[in-house]
Image: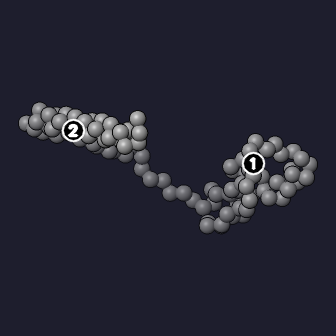
């Protein structure tokens, strides 16, 4: 079997599948043509909004400011200085190659 035969068979299978799906969809729409649409989505909220007071936040940070260590510590990482210290003590375990 060469590539052209393979592509012809793949195209025939795809066309057959596509035509079958079109026939099933049109058949389904003929059955449901007399019925109204029954799917209705409704959303309701039971909670009222609550005002947050800035004094409840961590002291020392202003709104919009970010602590330098917060992003790396929050993700379980270490700072760059800590990374260099771990590399010097050979405490890092390499699981795959590092590309630069």
Residue pushed farthest left? 34
The tag on residue 97 is 1
| Number of callouts | 2
Query: Residue 56: x, y in percent?
Result: 63, 56
- Taking the spot 27% from the left edge, 35% from the top edge, the residue there is 17
Query: Residue 6: x, y in percent?
Result: 38, 38
Query: Residue 25: x, y in percent?
Result: 19, 37
Whether residue 49 sits left or right of residue 83 in the image: it is left
The reply to whether dot 2 and dot 1 touch (C-beta < 8 Å) is no
Quadrant the N terminus occupies? top left
- Please say if 55 is above or below 39: below
Residue at mark 2 to residue at mark 1: CA–CA distance: 48 Å
Task: Tell me the SS state at disc 1.
Answer: loop
- Taking the spot 89% from the left edge, 47% from the top edge, the residue there is 90
In the rendered image, which residue does mark 2 sit on?
19
Query: Residue 63: x, y in percent?
Result: 61, 66
Task: Tell me if I can see residue 32 in this picture.
Answer: no
Residue pushed farthest front? 2
Picture quadrant where residue 5 is located:
top left
Quadrant the C terminus occupies? bottom right
Task: Tell me the SS state at disc 2.
Answer: helix
Residue 91 or 20: which is nearer the viewer?
Answer: 20
Task: Tell me if I can see residue 97 in this picture.
Answer: yes
Residue 41 or 100: which is nearer the viewer?
Answer: 100
- Taking the spot 28% from the left edge, 43% from the top edge, the residue there is 42
Q: Earlier in the sequence, mark 2 or mark 1?
A: 2
Whether residue 34 sits left or right of residue 23 in the image: it is left
Whether residue 19 sits left or right of residue 44 in the image: it is left
Label 2 crowd (10 A; few <14 / some 14-19 / many >=20)? few
């Amino acid at each position: 079997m060469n590539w052209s035969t393979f592509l012809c068979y793949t195209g025939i299978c795809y066309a057959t599948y596509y035509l079958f799906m079109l026939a099933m969809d049109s058949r389904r729409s003929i059955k449901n043509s007399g019925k109204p649409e029954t799917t209705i989505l409704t959303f309701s909220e039971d909670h009222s909004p609550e005002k947050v007071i800035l004094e409840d936040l961590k002291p020392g940070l202003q709104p919009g400011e970010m602590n330098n260590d917060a992003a790396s510590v929050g993700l379980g990482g270490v700072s760059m200085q800590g990374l260099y210290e771990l590399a010097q003590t050979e405490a890092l375990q390499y699981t795959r190659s590092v590309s630069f």
